[in-house]
Image (cartoon, helix red, strand yellow):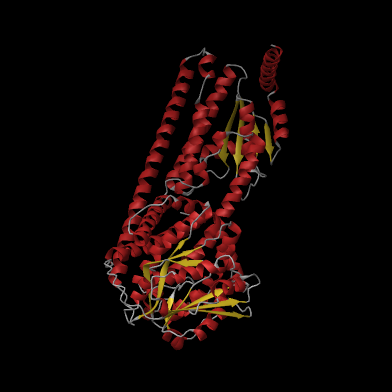
Amino acid sequence: MDKISLLGHIVVFFSLYFEIFFLITYLSKDKKIDSTFEFTPPVSILIPCFNEEKSVVATIHSILALDYPKEKIQIIVIDDGSTDNTYSEVVQHFQNKSSIEIYRKENGGKYTALNFGLTKAKHEFIGSLDADSFVDEKSLKFIMEKFLDPEVMATIPSTIIHNPKNMLQKAQRAEYTFGTFIRYILSSLDAIYVTPGPFSFFRKEVFEKIGIYKHAHNTEDMEMAMRLQKNNMRIAHAEKAIIYTIGPNTIKKLYKQRVRWASGFMGNLNDYKSMFFQKKHGNLSMLVLPFITLATCSVIFFSFVTLFRLIKNIHDTIQRISIVGFSFKDINFFDWIYFNGGSLSILSIFLLLYAILALSIGNKLLHGKTKFDLEFFYMIALYPLMYPFWIIKAGYNVLLSKKAPWR
Amino acid sequence: MNKQIDWKKYLVTLLITVFIFITAFSFSNNLNNKRIVDVKRIQDSIATDILSSETQFSLLSELSCKEFGNSTLSNELNTLAERIQNSANSLGNKNEEVQFLKKYYSLLEIKDYLLMRRISERCGEKFMFALYFYDDEENCPDCNKTGYTLTYLRNKYPQLRVYSFDKNSDVSAVKTLLSIFKVKAPFPVIALGDQVVISGYKEKEELEEILKKTYPKETKKILDELAKKESIEKNASSTKEKK
């Protein structure tokens, strides 16, 4: 076994370990959910926006349509110095609504908009909603239900892609469904490490105890979750609380979004590296953080290996065609993808089957029935081609401390 | 909140993961063993074919050249080479079984080469022979290109029989070949016929010229046949157009 193959086996071993751990957690979890919807405390919802003229009105309308006592919702819109018509759109549509407060400030980044909103929030439960997302009418009740547990300090919802039109957005929908399964398990393990911008809620005391939002490499949502975890504050997942978000519709936009996420992810992991392998921080520290770090490093390493092999294969093929001439029988697809019946190939099939299972479970959590989406194939066809690029670019950004734009 | 770690779950997961890993490894081993058995079977069949031809050759003083003219041994050898390469890809080049298969393959090549030479002498200069000695990619960056050039020549001149040998092979028969042809760096080295030994990389056209000089009759015959074929095809197509 050569060194690269050995490394591949190590990575696959840990991936398999991680996945089996998740599966056991899922199977052993008590799945009984009794929705009583008895807990409807007053809430403040912050909507930070920056150049969101196209979606912000629909976002606010979706909050107004929530199945929740209207008098208990305070909506705070914070325009972070948009250069388009975001502010005038909001004013035009909602200036007469007493439950909506509209503010405008100089551009300072999303975290400054959120912190500004925190100063205006009146209620004990504070949530935020990105201005490119919409909430399902029952979502807030599902979220608040989780706070019946006095130990729960924050709750995150399930996010799905709104009305996917092209292949790229459909691939993202499969990814988000897969993500629902991951959130569900992470919540059981007390290991949620992101409180996403779309509709995460906190008890007000969280901000009083551990402080307000930070810049955090433009991913304040991950940093906040890490800070909660560091202070051993529980984050729950309300899997039935569905939030719709608009997925980037071009590769360029998706790339930009993911570079920002991945750069922030790496930067925050680095900032919180002291949390690794600390028993007091539980599964997050002993399993989840080390694994995601290993996974990220291996993606970078194996991307280079694959790229190197691909370039060599292309070079050899061109050379052969230029000397021998073109022949179909020489194009051996299986040689190209290195499927040779080796243990690595067989184990990869296990990982693939697991991904299919996770997606089906994700659907069950979201929609109540196990379903396999064909969109999964878009995901496995597109993501391996794109993922390495944004991970490598993010790694480059982190190394050179380059800043990625916030949206 | 106190975070709990369920160490039992960590251990159970480890056991299941190890179990799956062992299952995958044994499955892959079975698959590779089957592949090796397959390769060995082909090698044995080729060895039997060569032995049978040699015996036939010794038995008959006057041998009909036709019987050997249709030999498909070289094609089988090519298929065998591909299969060994597949095994090497999954098991690694240093694997003992792969090493053994490669040695056996080299010996079969030499046996085929010797037999074909004897047949060639008996039946008139019918075949052309190229012994191709290569080195690792690090020491011989042009070996790949030369391999393709030889494939091109073999496609163009079907009577050309190419035998490839790893310069680093520890098969004594290969070492003997290296000393007979006084093979020295720079690699690749190609021995054409008995006399011509080419060291270092040669372009396609250059190598073809040397082949033509080494085997003037054989190459001319093939090229003439090719030209004849082409002119027939041309005539046929022009007649079609006129119609």
Q: Is residue B185 above or below residue B125?
A: below
Is A349 placed above or below B224 here? below
Of residues A225 and B137, the one nearer the viewer is A225
Say left or right for B42 vs A56: left
Res A215 seen here: no
- The answer to which quarter of the image holds residue B101 is top left
Q: Name the quadrant of the C terminus of chain B.
A: top right
Q: Residue furthest bottom?
A: A208
Task: Please indicate whether residue A315 sits to the left or right of residue A336 in the image.
Answer: right
Q: Is residue B123 visible?
A: yes
Q: Give whichever of A3, A169 is nearer the camera.
A: A169
Residue located at (61% from left, 70% from top): A51
**Which residue: 43% across, 76% down?**
A201
* Residue A305 figure quarter: bottom right
**Horizontal and vertical percent for residue B72?**
50, 24
Q: Nearer the viewer, residue A180 or B214?
A: A180
Question: Residue A91 sits in which quadrant?
Answer: bottom right
Residue at (33%, 62%) from the top-left corner? A23
> Can you give x and y, in whole percent of width and height, for residue A249 in the image?
56, 57
Determine whether A93 is above or below B152 in the image: below
Task: Indicate the position of residue B18 as horizontal and vertical percent values.
Answer: 33, 59
Quarter of the image with the N terminus of chain B is bottom left
How far from the left and from the top, in percent, is residue A320? 63, 39
**What residue is at 62 percent from the left and 74 percent from the top?**
A401
- How many badges with numbers are in the image? 0
